[in-house]
Amino acid sequence: MELIIEGIRKAIWLLFTLDPEVLGITWLSLKVSGTATFISLFIGISLGTVVALTRFPGRRLVVSLINTGMGVPPVVVGLFVTIFLWRNGPLGLFELLYTPTAIIIAQAVIATPIVAGISLASIQKLPEALRLQILALGATRAQMIWMLIKEARLPLLAAVMAGFGGVISEVGASIMVGGNIKGYTRVLTTATVMETGKGNFDIAIALGVILLIFTFCINAILTGIQQRERPR
Amino acid sequence: MSVPILEVRGLKVSRGGVPVLDISELTVQAGEFLSLIGPNGTGKSTLLLGLAGLVKRNAGEIRFHGRAITNGSDMLEYRRHLAMVFQEPLLFDATVYDNVASGLKIRGMRRSHIRPLVEEHLELFGVAHLSSRSARKISGGEAQRTSLARAFATNPELVLLDEPFVSLDPPTREAIIDDLGRVMQTRRTTVVMATHDRMDALRMSNRIAFMEGGGIVQVGPPSEVMHQPVNQTVAAFVGIETMLEGEVRDSSAGVLVVDINGRSIAAAGSFTPGERVMCLVRPEHVMIFPAGSSTESSARNRFTGTVRSVQSFGLIHRLEIDCGFLLIAHVTSLAMEDLHLKQGMTVNAAFKATSVHVIRSSHS
């Protein structure tokens, strides 16, 4: 018990004195996961919208694949990204393994199906007739798609939040492709794992608290969005 | 006559391989109000979507001001001359103002030109006070008003209305119909409205098209469809309750004598003796007199019968009278009291020969 109290006390101290190492790790985490989410947003929303609005053979399979992708364990993604980026792997020549870029790639792969799945569901949930209504207002196809995305902007924001929440708290892939190199690829989760392993509970708790604050904020926004209703 | 605003020929639409719409011909004149009526699932909505080019046509042609609309770039141009209002208001998650402005924004109109048009239409449809309110926070009636304002804001030549009043309570609905009527009178906008409410169709339209099984079975002025339905489905829909099957006995100078269960009914029409026909009588056209009174009516058809049942609809009462055949009559409350009408009473019922509409029997 004393261990925890002492840990929390030190953690608060680290947070309030803006400890450079903690700050650096937090900043890197935000940068890496933010970039990964941003990439997944483009691919995920486009993919989700296209699948939601078109009918083609094999569509059900694509939907199932996206839904499966939403639940793929990050270590599996880490494994495949590692293989691809390995010195002798298909993308080995770029020498990306154990760089922040590698973590961004892995996290984008994890977040894309989450964003695509939620986008697909939210665009599909709009009333069927809304599409017809927009076209009847004289919209081009591109205008219609843009208006539908705008109409689903809140659930899409939820998709972004869910994607970000998924990758910032993910540890398996980050440690595999990033290598947890101090000051270079060490992010909140990988640092927490390491510090806990070393018995440095104060830093581990400080990092844990920061992660919890992020998670809380993300879920608060998500809850707010989910409580809203569409107009008649 | 000038070129019709809209001409439809051989329009065919199927869904999942099943034909749902087959319109051989339909013409709409500029400034006209045409109602599509008929039971649910007869293709009214599909026809409207077809007119807006929003369903895939399997065959057929739509001409707008005499020019055929193809599926390419004409379609967008054509759609920008029309507007459509659905049963649900289908508003965007934005303010009432932005909703009304949406059609104009789509057309790439400048902000400074949009404002006066939006304000004018918010005013016309009585939602100016809600301008900055979110569309999520207004009532159903206000939402439908906003939807109408959005449709009219682009000053469309043709407005397609798909059951726009069906989910509104009666006072709201009346108020909106009044406002819509006013706008249309000043604009002379051409309207095609789908409805399953015959009263709405009767009071608003210049012409009514009756739809059945994906096709149009009758088109004409409201009085014609009301009084001279072409078949039993139309008759039932426009409120004709007495439909008597019989055989033509005699036909001379446009007056028929039809035998119904051994009783003769005089009717106007031209059929040849021996033909199986249906005699249709509107319940409002049946007059009721006390039994034994000397009927002062000039009506050719007079029968004595027993009141089988009395049903009250507030101001109107529906009587079933057995006079060898079942005759349905509508009687006002006042007449009910005057004649002391009750179930089981014997009465005289009368209707004019010209009140009987005769159609060929569907069973022959």
Image (cartoon, coloured by chain):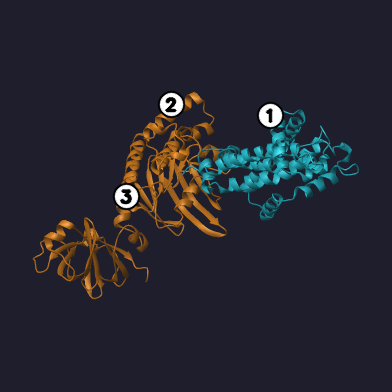
Query: Label 2 neighbourhood size at 10 Å, few (<14), some (14-19), many (20+)?
Result: few
**Location of residue B191 with respect to B273 vertically, above or below:** above
* Coordinates of residue A99 in the picture (x, y in percent): 83, 36
Front in this rendered view, residue A21 or B54: A21
What residue lies at 50% left-to-right and 32% top-to-bottom? B104
Toward the front, the furthest residue is A2
- State the CA–CA distance, disc 3 to disc 2: 35 Å
The amino acid type found where label 1 is placed reads Phe
**Location of residue B247 with respect to B131 vertically, above or below:** below
Residue B125 location, quadrant: top left
Residue beneath disc 3: B202
Tell me the chain of label 3: B
Residue beneath disc 2: B116
Residue beneath disc 1: A16
User: What secondary structure is found at the residue carrying circle 2?
Assistant: helix
Chain letter, colour orange: B
Residue B339 location, quadrant: bottom left
Q: Are marks 1 and 2 on the same chain?
A: no
